[in-house]
Image (cartoon, helix red, strand yellow):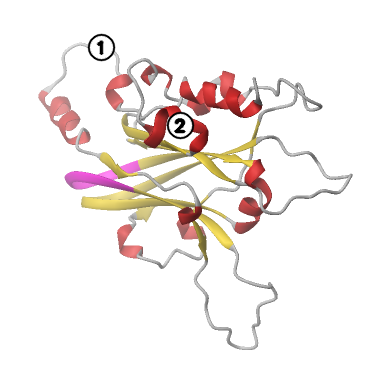
Amino acid sequence: MTIKKMLCFALACACVATVSAQRRTARGSKSAAEEAQDKMDAKVRISQMPSIGPQSLIMAPALSAQGGLQPISKGRRQWGVFDMTYRTQQKWTEDLTVNWYVLCDTAKAKTKDKSKSAKRLPPYVYYTLVTRYVNIPEGDHRSCVCLPPSFIERYGEPVVISCELVTSDGKLLDGETVLSNIGKPFVGGKFTEETKDKAEWWANDEIINAKIQKGPEKGEALIEVRQGLVDRSKSPFYLVNNADYEAIQ
């Protein structure tokens, strides 16, 4: 089985749109206040997941140089910009956490080091980031994370993106996954009843700790965990449509 086929199979068994009902266990009867809160929580939903592909690769806004500051780069470089839309129906939501999980294919790297001393890249690189929003009014909102140009150029573009909406006490409200062509059995991240209990591919040892099965890299890690994913507030896109994003804490 090839590396790509193995990952496809693993993701087919693990990547899944998740909802809070899949995690809950019976806790007995609930108070009226708890039931009312559950109803409001049920109205917090992901409306639209980020795109995967060329449409998610964006050049940073260009500003005119002033005070003698001139660019030294040869041109504008592309960032990976991943924007998710979610909706709340409470007048105010005190806080909401968004968990991001991004898997990139290093074969899609645009700048490859072919020197003899270069470290061999794993087939896939994985990033994660937690963002907490506060004082969220009723309505539609966006959450966005970015990969700086050097990470896109060196480690490739995303092929799987997952998001979770979570309360401050860890209650999962909604979750969804989008995949590129390596996940054709689950186009758009919609999953079956058979796989919903294996939703958290990022916590699945069979995926995260998988080894290459063939070739000179046999036994080496299939996926390398890296840091690099940043919230849009730490990117040049911070002031673009800024009213769509709530305060981060």
Q: Is residue 14 above or below residue 83?
A: above
Q: In the rendered structure, which amino acid carries the disc numbered 1?
A: Ala
Q: Position of residue 57 (x, y in %)?
A: 51, 57
Q: Which numbered circle lies on residue 26?
A: 1
Q: Which numbered circle lies on residue 206?
A: none
**Local secondary structure at mark 2:** helix
Q: Which residues are magenta?
A: 85-96
State whether residue 241 appears in this view. yes
Q: Residue furthest right?
A: 116
| Mark 2 neighbour density, 10 Å: few (under 14) some (14–19) many (20 or more) | few
Q: Position of residue 96 (x, y in %)?
A: 33, 42
State whether residue 249 appears in this view. no
104 left or right of 98? right
Front in this rendered view, residue 182 or 157: 182
Q: Position of residue 58 (x, y in %)?
A: 50, 61
Q: Residue, x 27% and y 22% (percent of image)?
A: 21
User: Distance of mark 2 from mark 1, alpha carbons?
Assistant: 35 Å
On-image quarter of the N terminus: top right
Q: Residue, x 47% and y 19% (percent of image)?
A: 13
| Residue 74 lies in the magenta-colored region | no
**Local secondary structure at mark 1:** loop
Q: In the rendered structure, which amino acid carries the disc numbered 2?
A: Lys
| Mark 1 neighbour density, 10 Å: few (under 14) some (14–19) many (20 or more) | few
Q: Residue, x 65% and y 27% (percent of image)?
A: 3
Quadrant location of residue 226? top right
| Residue 89 lies in the magenta-colored region | yes
Q: Which numbered circle lies on residue 184?
A: 2
Q: Position of residue 16 (x, y in %)?
A: 40, 27
Front in this rendered view, residue 195 or 145: 195
Front in this rendered view, residue 33 or 172: 172
Q: Is residue 101 above or below residue 231?
A: above
